């Protein structure tokens, strides 16, 4: 993993183009140590590739200035090291096949999470259709959490400053995941952190299912705390009585999106569909990935749609207070199965 990191972030010479996909495959492979994994549904989609198949002189990450490379190191090295550590946190203990925790355990876990920098978190039983094709998860339940990215650097998108802030968000996800996983394991329950850069499940889909927020027309999760300026992390666990929320009060967001469409208009390469398309796996297809990926790779991870979203600019509550509603807007409701809650 470290070899791939130096090729991607420092631009070391190589006959092959650098690949974030290979970094993710490395962490995926660690899951094989579990032996038996929970499998995806037949209709599950594959994980979207990062590879744009561009020459090196068009890949922004390989053309940082020396000063930019040094700045990147302060976030990228901790990110990769914590991803490595997390991928090995299988533990040597024998955990119970199922587990139940007390309300006090949940309070301590959430206090730890917020002290570590978590903006919000929810719980879910992962549906098989949210697991990527040909992947698998070690435990059926998950903790879904978010961290916020600062508005000032994100507003400069696409730019090095914006990409550096996104990297800081990913670093925070990885550090927090390891802290929370260690806490859960120390209490005698099973836990395994999802990969910060994108793991074996659709984090955005899970975030909406868990009730954290709603998926906007740009395909990003929109939440009350951060708008779209967030990164999403996941921890898989065997705790069976998590306080799972089965309602989502944020789906009005897509009514607003249907009237706004600022991200559709402002996308530099017109990669965002005028209206999301329901997928066969229960999720939403919002963008043309191939078109987006090329510009994303060339222009510091782009993030224009994230930056200009009204929820990122003026905030969730302000948008909600001003929005009068659109009864004719299309809705894409993703069903949530009934799960026992914490007693």
Image (cartoon, grey):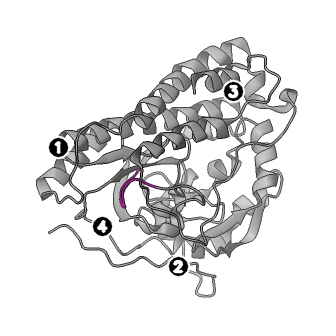
Among numbered discs 3 and 4, the one appearing first in the sequence: 3
Contact check, label 3 and label 4, Cβ < 8 Å: no
Q: Report the disc number at residue 170.
A: none
In the picture, measured across the screen, residue 309 lies left or right of residue 139, that is: right
Residue name at image x 77 percent, y 60 percent = 288
What residue is disc 1 on?
Answer: 187
Residue at the image point whose x is 40% and y is 65% from the top: 210
Other-residue count near label 1 (Cα within 10 Å), few / some / many at <14 / 14–19 / ≥20: few
Query: In terms of image quadrants, where is residue 339?
Result: bottom left
Q: Is residue 293 magenta?
A: no
**Mark nearer the N terminus (3 vs 2):** 3
Q: Give the Cα separation between the discs numbered 2 and 1.
A: 36 Å
Foreground pick, 6 / 255? 6
Q: Secondary structure at mark 4?
A: loop
Q: Which residue is mark 4?
A: 244
Secondary structure of the residue carrying numbered label 3: helix
Q: Is the residue 61 above or below the residue 322 in the image?
A: above
Question: Where does residue 167 sit, x and y in percent of width and height?
Answer: 56, 33
Q: Bin the neighbour count of mark 3 within 10 Å (Cα to Cα): few under 14, some 14-19, many 20 and up.
A: some
User: Disc 3 versus disc 4: distance between alpha carbons?
Assistant: 38 Å
Give the labeled residue for mark 2.
333
Range shown magenta = 137-145
Give neighbour class at mark 2: few <14, some 14-19, many 20+ (Cα, 10 Å).
some
Q: Tell me if label 2 and label 4 are in contact, CB under 8 Å.
A: no
Residue 283 location, x and y as percent? 59, 70
Q: Earlier in the sequence, mark 3 or mark 1?
A: 3
Q: Which residue is mark 3?
A: 8
Q: Nearer the viewer, mark 3 or mark 1?
A: 1
Q: Is residue 226 left or right of residue 269?
A: left
Which residue is at the front of the view, 189 or 92?
92
* Mark 1 vs mark 4: in front: 1
Tell me how far mark 3 sits from mark 1, CA to CA.
37 Å
């Amino acid at each position: 993993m470290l070899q791939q990191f130096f090729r991607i972030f420092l631009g070391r010479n190589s006959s092959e183009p650098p690949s974030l996909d290979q970094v993710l495959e490395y962490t995926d492979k660690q899951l094989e140590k579990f032996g038996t994994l929970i499998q995806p549904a037949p209709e599950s989609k594959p994980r979207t590739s990062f590879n744009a198949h561009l020459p090196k002189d068009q890949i922004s990450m390989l053309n940082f200035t020396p000063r930019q490379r040094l700045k990147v190191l302060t976030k990228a090295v901790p990110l990769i090291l914590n991803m490595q550590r997390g991928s090995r946190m299988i533990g040597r203990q024998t955990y119970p096949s199922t587990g139940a925790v007390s309300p006090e355990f949940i309070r301590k876990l959430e206090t730890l999470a917020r002290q570590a920098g978590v903006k919000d978190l929810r719980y879910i039983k992962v549906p098989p259709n949210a697991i990527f094709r040909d992947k698998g998860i070690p435990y059926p339940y998950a903790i879904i959490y978010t961290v916020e990215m600062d508005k000032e650097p994100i507003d400069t998108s696409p730019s090095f400053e914006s990409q550096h802030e996104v990297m800081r968000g990913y670093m925070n996800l990885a550090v927090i995941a390891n802290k929370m996983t260690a806490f859960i394991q120390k209490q005698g329950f099973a836990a395994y952190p999802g990969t910060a850069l994108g793991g074996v499940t659709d984090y955005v889909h899970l975030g909406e299912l868990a009730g954290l927020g709603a998926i906007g027309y740009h395909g990003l999760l929109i939440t009350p705390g951060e708008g779209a300026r967030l990164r999403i992390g996941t921890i898989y666990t065997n705790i069976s009585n998590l306080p799972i929320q089965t309602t989502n009060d944020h789906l009005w967001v897509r009514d607003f999106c249907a009237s706004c469409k600022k991200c559709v208009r402002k996308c530099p390469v017109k990669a965002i569909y005028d209206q999301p398309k329901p997928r066969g796996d229960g999720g939403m297809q919002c963008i043309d990935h191939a078109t987006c990926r090329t510009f994303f790779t060339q222009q510091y991870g782009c993030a224009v749609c994230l930056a200009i979203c009204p929820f990122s600019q003026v905030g969730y509550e302000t948008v909600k207070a001003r929005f009068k509603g659109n009864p004719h807007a299309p809705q894409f409701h993703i069903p949530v199965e009934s799960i026992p809650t914490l007693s």
